[in-house]
Amino acid sequence: MVRGEGTVIARGVSPQDAFDFVLDPAQYTKADTKMVWVTKITDTSDGMIAREDGRFLGRFPGSVVTRYRWERPSRIDVTLEHGVPERLHAWFDIDAVDGGTRIHHVEELDLGHGVLGRLHDLVARRWFADAVRKEVDEIARLLEAGERGRGPVA
């Protein structure tokens, strides 16, 4: 399994601003270099089912189907519904703090598939951790620069 994590304080930003940014593919893909696009398939009572198109190791195209669950504006939880990885879990915790918003993001990916999965973990571990940390830093930078999102995709 590979894991990436990052925490930032976005100054002058509300939790709703951060929540809407993360759930707007046009904005989020500016920060997440692993992600190409998110397409909503259907709404659910607590979020949505979506197809995520991305770049594996920043190079190889691939897609997964994920379930998004959210508690507006404080939590977004994403789990794998269908795709090559054995397990995918990502989440955002978004909290108001003095002067801004704390954004804590974690991504965990377990490719599985025996030796292939273990090889992936050896090759991808550092890249994945760095990519998630940079993603969170870029979300804060863009929000502080005035970028805003529309919220969950239509």
Image (cartoon, rainbow, N blue to C red):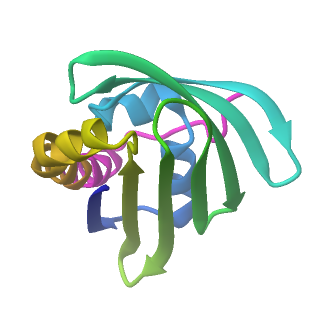
Residue 116 lies in quadrant: top left
The question of residue 144 being in magenta is answered with yes
Left or right of 90, for residue 65: right
Q: What residue is drawn where x is 35% and y is 15%?
A: 61
- Look at the image and give the residue range highlighted in magenta: 134-154
Q: What residue is drawn where x is 59% and y is 58%?
A: 77
Residue 59 to residue 87: above or below: above
Left or right of 59, for residue 23: right
Q: What is the residue that sits farthest to the right in this orientation?
A: 45
Residue 34 lies in quadrant: top left
> Looking at the picture, how far across and down is residue 55, in whole percent?
31, 23
Q: What is the residue that sits farthest to the bottom in this orientation?
A: 98
How many marks can you see? 0
**87 and 104: which one is in front?**
87
> Looking at the picture, how far across and down is residue 10, in whole percent?
32, 63
Q: What residue is drawn where x is 38% and y is 72%?
A: 102
Q: What residue is drawn where x is 21% and y is 30%?
A: 57
Residue 101 to residue 60: above or below: below
> Looking at the picture, how far across and down is residue 33, in whole percent?
26, 31
Left or right of 22, for residue 132: left
**54 and 133: which one is in front?**
54
Q: What is the residue that sits farthest to the front in this orientation?
A: 115
**113 and 130: which one is in front?**
113
> Looking at the picture, how far across and down is residue 117, in whole percent?
30, 42
**144 and 94: which one is in front?**
94
Quadrant into which the C terminus falls:
top right
The question of residue 79 being in magenta is answered with no
Left or right of 51, for residue 133: left
